[in-house]
Image (tube, grey):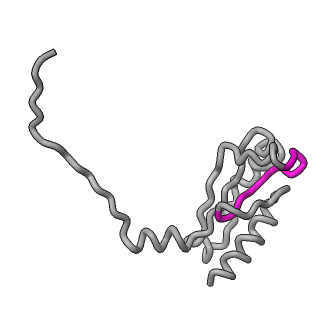
């Protein structure tokens, strides 16, 4: 093996600005379970929810598809599709109407 002499190092730091942190904290996180059961039982329709969120709320809501929230094991398949709000609150048998109503409640409570 040849001798190698280091010539320098590069260090990269990322420090989120206060603005980035505030945006993250203020957003309502909506996670849609897209595991097989949830997807087949309605999550495919829920994926259009971003387009249905009222314009005045869009900057306050982050919608994310998740591979699986593993709730069928804890609950049962009868509750699919599942949606999780802010990493804690679970909605079973989610529909676009129910999710939109809950987003409006959460945004209204945050305002």
Furthest-top residue in view?
1
Seen in the picture, residue 21 relative to 76 is either above or below; the reply is below
Q: Quadrant of the N terminus?
A: top left
Q: Nearer the viewer, residue 4 or 36?
A: 4
**Where is residue 50 drawn, in percent x and y?**
65, 61
**Where is residue 29 drawn, in percent x and y?**
62, 63
**Where is residue 14 drawn, in percent x and y?**
32, 58
Kindly identify the residue that appears in the image at 55 percent across and 74 percent down. Answer: 26
Kindly identify the residue that appears in the image at 74 percent across and 45 percent down. Answer: 70
Kindly identify the residue that appears in the image at 17 percent across and 43 percent down. Answer: 9
Kindly identify the residue that appears in the image at 62 percent across and 55 percent down. Answer: 64
Residue 35, picture quadrant: top right
Seen in the picture, residue 63 relative to 100 is either above or below; the reply is above
Furthest-bottom residue in view?
111
- Magenta residues span 75-86
Image position of 34 (left or right of 56): right
Give the number of callouts. 0
Image position of 25 (left or right of 32): left
Residue 79 covered by magenta stretch: yes
**Where is residue 74 drawn, in percent x and y?**
81, 47
Residue 56 covered by magenta stretch: no
Q: Quadrant of the C terminus?
A: bottom right
């Amino acid at each position: 093996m040849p001798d190698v002499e280091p010539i320098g190092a590069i260090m990269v730091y990322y420090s989120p600005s206060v603005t980035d942190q505030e945006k993250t904290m203020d957003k309502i996180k909506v996670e849609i379970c897209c595991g097989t059961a949830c997807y087949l039982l309605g999550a495919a329709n829920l994926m259009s929810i971003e387009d249905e969120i009222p314009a005045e709320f869009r900057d306050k809501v982050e919608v994310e598809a998740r591979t699986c929230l593993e709730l069928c094991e804890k609950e049962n398949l009868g509750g699919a599709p599942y949606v999780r709000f802010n990493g804690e609150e679970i909605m079973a048998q989610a529909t676009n109407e129910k999710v939109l109503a809950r987003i409006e409640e959460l945004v209204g409570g945050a305002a």
